[in-house]
Image (tube, coloured by chain):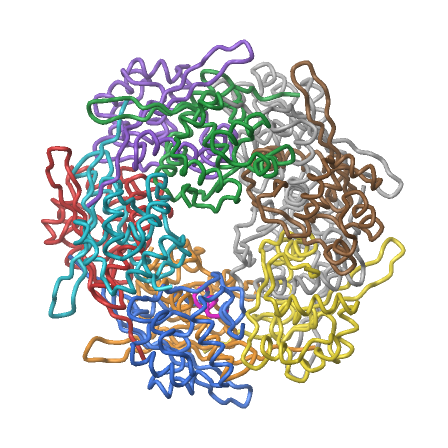
Chain colours: A brown, D yellow, E orange, F blue, G red, H cyan, I purple, J green
Amino acid sequence: MSHSAGTALPSINALLFEAKARKGLTFDEIARALGKDEVWVAAAFYGQAKFTPEELNKVSEVLEIEVGLLQAGLGDHWWPNRGLGPLPPTDPVIYRLYEGVLVYGHAIKAIIHEKFGDGIMSMIDCKINIEKKADPKGDRVLLTFDGKFLPYAKW
Amino acid sequence: MSHSAGTALPSINALLFEAKARKGLTFDEIARALGKDEVWVAAAFYGQAKFTPEELNKVSEVLEIEVGLLQAGLGDHWWPNRGLGPLPPTDPVIYRLYEGVLVYGHAIKAIIHEKFGDGIMSMIDCKINIEKKADPKGDRVLLTFDGKFLPYAKW
Amino acid sequence: MSHSAGTALPSINALLFEAKARKGLTFDEIARALGKDEVWVAAAFYGQAKFTPEELNKVSEVLEIEVGLLQAGLGDHWWPNRGLGPLPPTDPVIYRLYEGVLVYGHAIKAIIHEKFGDGIMSMIDCKINIEKKADPKGDRVLLTFDGKFLPYAKW
Amino acid sequence: MSHSAGTALPSINALLFEAKARKGLTFDEIARALGKDEVWVAAAFYGQAKFTPEELNKVSEVLEIEVGLLQAGLGDHWWPNRGLGPLPPTDPVIYRLYEGVLVYGHAIKAIIHEKFGDGIMSMIDCKINIEKKADPKGDRVLLTFDGKFLPYAKW
Amino acid sequence: MSHSAGTALPSINALLFEAKARKGLTFDEIARALGKDEVWVAAAFYGQAKFTPEELNKVSEVLEIEVGLLQAGLGDHWWPNRGLGPLPPTDPVIYRLYEGVLVYGHAIKAIIHEKFGDGIMSMIDCKINIEKKADPKGDRVLLTFDGKFLPYAKW
Amino acid sequence: MSHSAGTALPSINALLFEAKARKGLTFDEIARALGKDEVWVAAAFYGQAKFTPEELNKVSEVLEIEVGLLQAGLGDHWWPNRGLGPLPPTDPVIYRLYEGVLVYGHAIKAIIHEKFGDGIMSMIDCKINIEKKADPKGDRVLLTFDGKFLPYAKW
Amino acid sequence: MSHSAGTALPSINALLFEAKARKGLTFDEIARALGKDEVWVAAAFYGQAKFTPEELNKVSEVLEIEVGLLQAGLGDHWWPNRGLGPLPPTDPVIYRLYEGVLVYGHAIKAIIHEKFGDGIMSMIDCKINIEKKADPKGDRVLLTFDGKFLPYAKW
Amino acid sequence: MSHSAGTALPSINALLFEAKARKGLTFDEIARALGKDEVWVAAAFYGQAKFTPEELNKVSEVLEIEVGLLQAGLGDHWWPNRGLGPLPPTDPVIYRLYEGVLVYGHAIKAIIHEKFGDGIMSMIDCKINIEKKADPKGDRVLLTFDGKFLPYAKW
Amino acid sequence: MSHSAGTALPSINALLFEAKARKGLTFDEIARALGKDEVWVAAAFYGQAKFTPEELNKVSEVLEIEVGLLQAGLGDHWWPNRGLGPLPPTDPVIYRLYEGVLVYGHAIKAIIHEKFGDGIMSMIDCKINIEKKADPKGDRVLLTFDGKFLPYAKW
Amino acid sequence: MSHSAGTALPSINALLFEAKARKGLTFDEIARALGKDEVWVAAAFYGQAKFTPEELNKVSEVLEIEVGLLQAGLGDHWWPNRGLGPLPPTDPVIYRLYEGVLVYGHAIKAIIHEKFGDGIMSMIDCKINIEKKADPKGDRVLLTFDGKFLPYAKW
């Protein structure tokens, strides 16, 4: 088991992680081959996003997994069942994100309302990016959510 | 009650929100007066961050609240007791952030490890920024966490 | 206390319910005066939606509540903090809706994916309607959610 | 595993999903063969509704599964044990339904009482329908619950 | 506080319990005056059922409470918000009922299905009765639920 | 799996359910052979009650299961570990019983105290009966708990 | 507040604790005056047991509380609503009892079954005693539950 | 499975229970052979206490289990991971113990403090005993905890 | 409210915190006056430890609070009801301690067993110390638990 | 299963514990071979810390496990998914640590703030040490957390 999800992943996802380890590839390298971003590809490996049939073909080539296996497990008749526990997260990396919601959630909500009005930042039409920012006092993680603002319907 | 926290805020924080509403100021306007960012100021209004005595003086001026009241409630002998519920969040704005952790948490963790090694993005040495990005298909929220990477100690 | 929320409502909302009872008005009657639907107006009474300043003026007239009170409590500087417990619901009316999610949630998800692809029905851009359908075997409730389909972003 | 339930389904249900994927059929196509609605058929595939022996015969024909298997697993001596987790739902599609209960539950209850009196909308004598409504701003999901009103007994 | 609900009851319900204690009446005596059963009346005292205006008049007479108070609190514009915690129950009397569900729930379900088919015993169209049965080895409680069988809709 | 418990039953119980299905017997038919009531027998099938060695012999005969298997699994050295989840129940049949506790629990407690004094209805010395009552408006389920009253010890 | 329950006690119980502190009496001293045991009396002070009218008179005398107050709050029309949280207990004294259930519960159950058969130790017909046992290595607490064995009914 | 723990026991513990059933021995009989008490031995069978190597040899002889198996599973390099669920307990025998904590926990704490001062009854240095006390009204269970009093450190 | 507990403290504890703030004293300064350690004194201020009558006198002098108030609230008839939530902690300082248990709890247990055998580190006979250790890379917190080892009783 | 984690460990970790038991080594002995501390090594065995490739080679030598197995399971492409339940802990050793947070958490927070200002003790840059301190009244456990102080960012 070379992936790090606390929750047991379905075998088709475990297969992806094992092939990635065997090939010694990073998510960024796989993502470039697919013309996608590394965060999105990692999400898809965890079963949190859906590859198109073309993308599955690419994955098959890059990781040398038989395409039939991928199509059977992640193809047309499969839809991601999103959400990967546990919550509250026990791993410190994921807990810190959760703590961000716990400590800064109301402040973020207040600023969104002041800047945009009554509505939300979509997590469906949202792109997530991670960058490494060099800093003499220690490298920094830049984590960005770029999500569409959706105003509440009134009727 | 003009603020939007589901949890009842201590009276000193309620006072801040009421004064802000009475003066008709945005967090950004207050933040400029303090030389701070609007997200941090909103967090401090919710009792999630600590003003210095000088900042309390500025808050007193800007919001026309007696400084003694602020010093008594938020001064030297008070320390924020951080965390503002409920969790899971019931408000859709905050829930979407939580959903980001739920759906993309493992992917974010995987990419942080690939880019930085075994460690975390600090939520203590972390700055949060929100920007409005115009988009013909609808405005977008750019929410950025800029947190220091902390490698795990080994001993 | 003439409203039926299990959770104590803020006093400004309690005021709305008391005035409605005193005037003997239904949500439908109030909604017509506002040019809105009764479900949305009921949601706003429970603090789950936001009136515009013009709507607050109308509410003030219809219910004979001083407009200043409404503006102070529900006006520009207030944003709904949505979500009203308890969950799981204890009241049978609300529990049956919850049971609909529990029993039919996966089936609804499967059909949405088959008809629309990978995405969700928005609960933000969503209108809810309730109609009474006469039936010789007993009247029926027609409860309709009309929500925008949002495809997942890929990046 | 070609279905999308987060919870592991009993093998007899997994068999139905696999056959459906193998045959490349939609729920709507299977439903037409059975003279039923697609939502109900999807619910039955998830073990949330009960086929009659005749319907099992039809399912056997349409999906080319041996009828004995179906009768043994889903026949006379089997009764659905309804409810399919997790709750709160982690998948965004199902969570949005849950959020509908969380945000609009009390409003829906209020309107049902005003229109029907003291009682509930049955989730047992209830039919659920999903339709795709074209819209220039983006297709919409029409999700309808058509449930019998049941007044509370008094005694 | 002369009633025994662990959860604080609304003041209007507390008033009913206090008047009942002051008058020294049993639920059975009040129920006879109303032409109702004692269990239902007790439920209504706990805010779990709704009196008609005529019944409120009778309650007013029997308990010598001003009818205006009762109409304001429990009248036309009030609907019961049912469910009274805590769950799991901490009081042994109520816990034993809960234990009945925990230990015998699946057996009861199995027998209902064998005797009636796929459906439920309604708790909405249900009457509850309690009788004292003398027994030389110690009196026994006869607790009966008389609920309508509701078959599941298929569509 | 022909029984309906949501929780996986131990294999010895699964065996009982399979044999019952294979023989096409109802709980009532098995109960008559044992000189017991159908509810109690169903409870025993779910591992919630204990057969005597003589009863195990009878079960062996009626269901044509080797008696040694039954003695090994359910005999002298086995004691029921009662309680069968999930709680809150997700299946509507069992949930309605739970809802009975939630809505009418305090009323039932109040009437038991008024009729019997300070004590409880035992769920250990309790017999449960289910009957079908024909009714022109729809059959009704009569569910009776006949439990010994136990006064609290004082010391 | 001179008692130690984490949960706020009703004012009538707080009154008992305050009077006890004012008079400087131990539970044992009060219990002797009532002809009862100290554990039972402490339970009654916490609202977990019911005094008879005669016992309330005695309590009134011993603690110099007006008897009318006691009769109004704890008299004929009041029934204990038992159970006092929180659970899991946070106080180490009570947690250790809970830990006894957690660690030794199954062993205790096994021995009760071996010694008595299929049944339970009643917590309703149960007397609890605490004694101080001198020991050179440190005093010991002897905590005894003396509860009636109740065999399961079969029917 | 001849033991009664709701939670699946590790195979080495299951082996102990199976051998005990096969030999037809009670815990008391095994305990005598070991020079221990039956409750402690039952706890050890459930993995809640640790046998010495000598005791494992004795267990091996008495139950005719190969000693190497016992040493491998329960020997020097194994330490009990105590606590055996579920909590709240679902089995009535164990629940009654839990109910004792729930109803009488605060009273027990109050008496311990009055008799011993500020400290706890240790559940680590604690011996548990169960005796059968004949009684004309029905046998009684005498369950005793004999635990060392530990005063709180002050520093 | 100048203390930082998320949970509302009893008024007598709030009084202590207010007086401490008014006098501008640190816990260390108060502790020196009492001949105690600052961590223990802080615990006592939070109601988590018990002052002797002599210590209350000292507290009265140092903080200029009337001694009668302290004796009434924290004196002979009061016993700490320990445990102060919320758990899981929401404040990052306390959460990090909790995370220590979550991540390193099993390792700590393993080393305690290897070094001491089967037993625990007492949290009752335990002293806690905090020191500031200067470090060129940033000051460090030295947090020490000095607790008595307690071997498990066997009987 | 010779390790003591309540939660089933991945097979690669179970392998480490089995080899350690087979070789009869303590964590301290393994730690010396690795040039690490025993607590950290125990944490790594439980999957809560990450070995470098060189450390894996050493582990392979010391425990005589094939290095390929270790590299495949714990090597470059694996990242610890930290956190090991259950929480609240059921084992008394780990519970006592948890109780330390519950009882002394707020006091520790207060002292950290007084000594260091607004910030936290890092659990990421933290070293944990356990020592045995001989004491005539019974040996003591010295458990030390040496963690970097991190001040909150302000922006």
Q: Is residue G49 left or right of residue D138?
A: left
F136 or A59: which is nearer to us? A59
- Name the image quarter holding the N terminus of chain G: top left
Q: Which residue is drawn at 54% across and 80% down?
A: D77
Q: Which residue is drawn at 57% across and 82% down?
A: D76
J8 up-or-down from I84: above or below: below
Q: Where is residue E51 in the image (x, y as percent from the top left)?
A: 48, 70
Magenta: predominant secondary structure element? helix
Q: How many marks?
A: 0
**Magenta-drawn segment:** F96-102
Q: Position of residue D16 (x, y in %)?
A: 68, 70
Is residue H149 among what the camera can see?
yes
J145 or E36: which is nearer to us? J145
Q: Residue D73 occupies which quadrant of the picture? A: bottom right
Q: Position of residue J59 (x, y in %)?
A: 51, 30
Q: In this view, does F86 lie to the left or right of E132?
A: right
Is residue G52 among what the camera can see?
no
Q: Position of residue F33 (x, y in %)?
A: 37, 88
H132 up-or-down from J18: above or below: below
Q: Would residue F147 be counted in the magenta stretch?
A: no
Q: Which residue is drawn at 52% across and 30% down?
A: I92
